[in-house]
Image: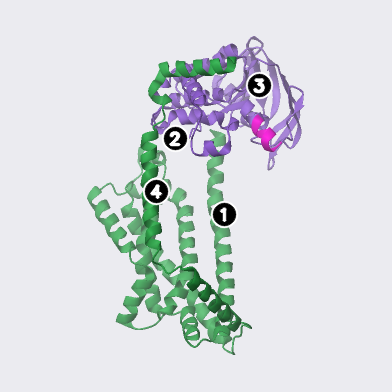
Chain colours: A purple, B green
Amino acid sequence: MLELHNLRKSFGRTMAIDGVTLRVERGEMVGIIGRSGAGKSTLLRLINRLTDADEGEICWQDRDITRIGGRALREWRAHSAMIFQRFNLVERLDVVTNVLVGCLHRHALLPSLIKSFPAEDRARAILELDRVGMADKALQRTETLSGGEMQRVAIARAMMQQPSLLLADEPVSALDPFNANGVMNALVAANRERGITVMVNTHTIDLARTFCQRLIGIRAGRIVFDGSPGQLDRGLEAELFGNTMLRQAA
Amino acid sequence: MTAAVDGRDVIARAHLVAAQAMTPRHGKRMLRWAGWGIGLAALVAMGCDLGFSSERLLAGMLRAGHLLTLMWPPTSAGQAGAVFKALGQTIAMAFLGTVLVVILALPLGIVGARTIVQQPVIHFVLRRLLDAARTIPSLVWAMILVAAFGLGPRVGVTAMVLAETPYLAKLFAETMENRRQGVIESLQAAGATRLQVLRYGLMPEVLPLMTGKALLLFEGNIRASAALGLVGAGGIGVLLDTRIQLLQLDQVAWILMLFIVLVLTIDLSSQALRRRLINAKSYNLERMDADA
């Protein structure tokens, strides 16, 4: 169970996250919706501590992780895998090595620096690639892949971390609808088959409606909606996305 | 027990899925390492002849220690004026050299950038010429020029220009090539002319990077001008040379102290400037990512 208490984070004079309190149960699949710049990315990055909060608390299973550092922080990050909008794979490494990056945190420093991994980890990496349909490209250089393929490799890398929480930051907004569906289905599979808690940011609301059981709407760094897709009517939706959407609809 | 069985099972299944990926290509890697090893061994072998024997090293260190005592206390010997004038000349040489190199390297760099001049023959010929010219260091140019035209700072500046223009032109060309093609295409798609594409698509992105490289060159030129002086091509090096010849090491120490202060000041301020240029750029890129 993930609990956020009164989180705040500002960049200069902009309040990116303005007093967010939130509770996510284990095994939930939560869609975080809102327009660009609402603070969705910052919220996820606060959770895995890529960004540090100005105020507030983050707890996982009743353990405060707001101020941990060093090894404890690295373990927490491995535990809460992240998927990025632009995939962030190492394009000059081959596909399977990119997936093996996901188990670096479990390995001794020296063998990992000469890219030596135990056969079992290599095998797991290949099986993870197989689950997203990418095993045949395991030895290909990553820069030769298409966007959809890269994001599937990124999911395999995240699964390799054996996480309990998966933070997906706009995972499909750089992809076409077909690939977007594939990636969202892979997130659902991670959630249903492995019981991983998934938090996925998106500004495409229909995608969130289709794939998530719970939606959290953010506007100007505050939570303005928290409920099931059914509870989010058109009026609320328009409010969430601000005046621009209303004008477009009119 | 179960864990071990599980592990073996995982490996077996992975072999079924993609056997070729299960065996990392050790052979190829070993070959590459062997190549590196042989190269390194050859380098070490060539180094055996450099006179780094231990007793000579010790004798040399003792002598160097003695010379160090001659350096204390540093003194201007009443020639502070001449020293400051020579330092000023050094800065002027480095500055003039840098400006001339930038002026010459800019057009060469633009023509040399594959993404801008899409004419393989021109590109190839220019690049190879630049490569060839780059092989001669400024000190060698200075020695040739001093023999031909006599002593003086003019020769030092000319040597810098000859040696560094090809170098900076290549850096400029590579900087311009590494830009995102998408930006340039978007301007072409908007109907911009070739020059407009350069002005709006390329300049805003590469100008901070190229200015940074020019500043780095200026830093290097300050140091290089001291060496150029040793062969009579003007600047602070000339003063150093005469005093070393006469073993007036206390005066050498005094000049060196000033020179170190000068180089540090210029390096630090140019570093700060470069950081500002480049940070402003990465900040903008970050914002673009956040907005997307």
The residue that label 3 is drawn on is: A217
Classify residue A28 by image quadrant: top right
Q: Residues within 10 Å of mark 3 (few under 14, many from 20)?
A: many
What is the C-alpha distance between the residues marked 1 and 4?
41 Å
Q: Secondary structure at mark 1?
A: helix
Three-letter residue code for mark 1:
Arg
Residue B151 in view of the camera: yes
What is the C-alpha distance between the residues marked 3 and 1?
38 Å
What is the C-alpha distance between the residues marked 2 and 4?
27 Å
Which is more toward the observer, B66 or B108?
A: B66
Point out which mark residue B37 bears. Answer: 4
Nearer the camera: disc 2 or disc 4: 4
Nearer the camera: disc 3 or disc 1: 1
The stretch in magenta equals A69-75
Please tell me whether residue B164 is drawn above or below residue B36 in the rendered image. Answer: below
Mark 3 vs mark 4: same chain? no
Task: Determine contact: label 1, label 4, CB under 8 Å.
Answer: no
